[in-house]
Amino acid sequence: MVANNFDELKALPRDKVAGKIVLFNYSFDKQMAAGGHGGDAYGEAVVYRGDGPSAAARQGAVACLIRSVGGADYRLPHTGQTKYADDAPKIPAGALTAEDADLIVDLVRQGQVKMKLTLTPQQLPDVESYNVIGDIKGSEHPEQIIIVSGHLDSWDLGTGAVDDGAGVAVSMEAANLIQKLHLKPKRTIRMIAWMNEENGLAGSKQYEKDHREEWSNHFAAMETDGGAGHPIGINIKGKFEIKKLLAPVLAVLQESGAGGTNFAEHVGADIEPMEKADVPAFSPIQDSRFYFNYHHTAADTLDKIVPKELAENSAVVAVVTYALANMEQPLPR
Ligand SMILES: [Zn+2]
């Protein structure tokens, strides 16, 4: 049976759902993405992938299918993490392409539909892996750290070029640019390629364990995890006064059209422990119109990266990183 959203499912009596396969048919809002709000469109859709299977199981469903929660055409399924709640049976779940979801919805309108699911994923035991960390030591306050980062792992269908090879490349190149220009940061710039963002944030959690006593010396944290689309400014998670302090930097960025700011509740998954500890956090605001056409699909491959736009992101991150490293005053927390 088909439910377009959680409310529709809840409105159904349990005996209508019990023993059935539930298809969540929530459509990714392509117009919202086209308007530059790809992340918001994803946020509204991804709850079905995350919470849909348990919601269906609570009403007795035996399996769950999720209409792809991205904007991909060309019959590409969009996949990703599912959270099984403790209070519901762990039923099998799978992603459907938008085209196949439409087809099934149409067939269900005509009568009963029988499906046989062959789902191959399995959870293998954890293996040892690592965050990759490199420091450019600060000349005056080496103990104070600015993190510039992306995540090294990716979801499995593609090669993870936009999510998040781009973020790692942008961060490494930002550090590289600062060195190539022979700039001397006063604070330490720490480039991190996080491990296992996608499947539980193990690298971020380990870093938190190892470094949380030093959060007061973590001056700022940045993560690039929105692909390599043209940057138009920076997201800020922190006090409003930060924008004023960054005004000269924003003026420099505005020369390439990247001087905008946006205050956000949350700017990066791996740096969230620092966000929660009130470490000022940043990320580039990137063109998100097309990101969710590729993100977590088999089409997330290197050809989707526009080298010029990748370089623009490195420039923005390098400028902000160096400015933070050499700021006269501390940022308010
Ligand atoms: Zn990512």
Image (tube, rainbow, N blue to C red):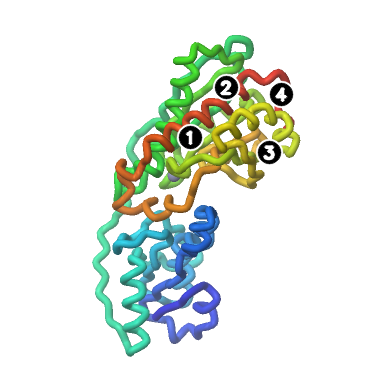
Instruction: Tell me the residue that label 3 is attached to.
Output: 238
Q: Using the image, tell me which numbered label, if any, was put on residue 313.
A: 1
Q: Nearer the viewer, residue 81 or 108?
A: 108
Task: State the quadrant of the C terminus.
Answer: top right
Is 236 above or below relative to 72? above
Q: What percent of the width, then of the height, locates residue 245? A: 72, 29
Q: Quadrant of residue 261?
A: top right
Labels 4 and 3: the sequence-earlier one: 3
Q: Report the residue marked by disc 4.
A: 330
CA separation, marks 1 and 2?
Answer: 14 Å
Amino acid of disc 4: Pro
Residue 125 appears in the picture as rendered:
no
Report crowding for label 4: few under 14, some 14 to 19, many 20 or more residues within 10 A (C-alpha). Answer: few
| Cα–Cα span, label 1 and label 3 | 21 Å
Q: Nearer the viewer, mark 3 or mark 2?
A: 2
Residue 86, x across and y down, in percent:
49, 61
Q: Which residue is mark 2?
A: 322
Task: State which quadrant residue 91 falls in.
Answer: bottom left
* Screen quadrant of the N terminus: bottom left
CA gap, disc 3 and disc 2: 18 Å
Label 3 sits on what residue type? Answer: Gly
Amino acid type, label 1:
Asn
Q: Residue at x 31, y 71 (%)?
A: 100
From the viewer's perspective, tell me whether residue 158 is left or right of residue 219: left
Q: From the Cβ of disc 1, is ligand 1 less than 8 Å away?
A: no
